[in-house]
Image (tube, rainbow, N blue to C red):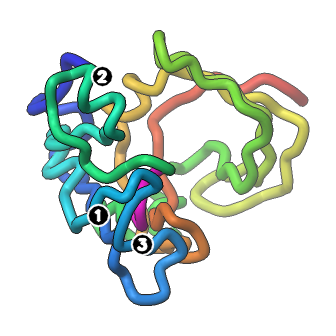
Amino acid sequence: MLDSLGEQILPEWLTIEEHPHLLKGLASTPFDGEGVRTERRDIIKDGVLTQWLLTNYSARKLGLKSTGHAGGIHNWRIKGRGLSFEKLLKEMGTGLVVTELMGQGVSGITGDYSRGASGFWVENGEIQYPVSEITIAGNLKDMWRNMVTIADDIETRSNIQCGSVLLPEMKIAGQ
């Protein structure tokens, strides 16, 4: 991602905002783990990477200023098109709704992605039956670039608040 600052890395309809001072936010904090003041900022604006997440160490290595991210991110809100989950299923037609991911299988170098998953199989826009003990795989850059939409069913019990994401394709292995 080092060469991606200022570049379109996500669809133009997608914005990621950080709100570190959100009242009752699960990751709200006035300062990061190194004592750097946190502030509200756009990480991605209209699909363009506008901000790196830097600690004092990484900022020094790059000759930049810390962005207050020692210890991680602070209350991200991912905004998409505002489509309902039901409409997302209809747009999907046939596919997999992933409700749980297991393990860690992401390469920070190549972006290759592979994780255990479970969820529900969908046909004709309607949930048909549960699916478990499968693996999904793809590449993060391809997934980000080709995202179809994000629904408005936002999960608020996390420091990353995002609705369901519709991807055009992923590899699925299992029975």
Check disc 2: other Cα within 10 Å, few if <14, some if 14-19, many if 20+: few
Left or right placement of residue 3 versus residue 29 in this view = left
Q: Which residue position is annotated with label 3?
A: 29
Q: Which residue position is annotated with label 1?
A: 38
Left or right placement of residue 112 versus residue 9 in this view = right
**Secondary structure character of the magenta stretch overall:** loop
Residue at 35 percent across and 45 percent down: it is 148
Q: Nearer the viewer, residue 151 or 42?
A: 42
Residue at 31 percent across and 70 percent down: it is 19
Label 3: state its secondary structure: loop
For marks 1 and 2, the one nearer the N-term is 2
Asked if residue 31 is positioned above or below residue 24 in the image, the reply reads above
Foreground tag (1 vs 2): 1
Left or right placement of residue 67 versus residue 26 in this view = left
Q: Which residue position is annotated with label 2?
A: 1
Residue at 50 percent across and 73 percent down: it is 153
Residue 13's tag is: none
Label 2: state its secondary structure: loop
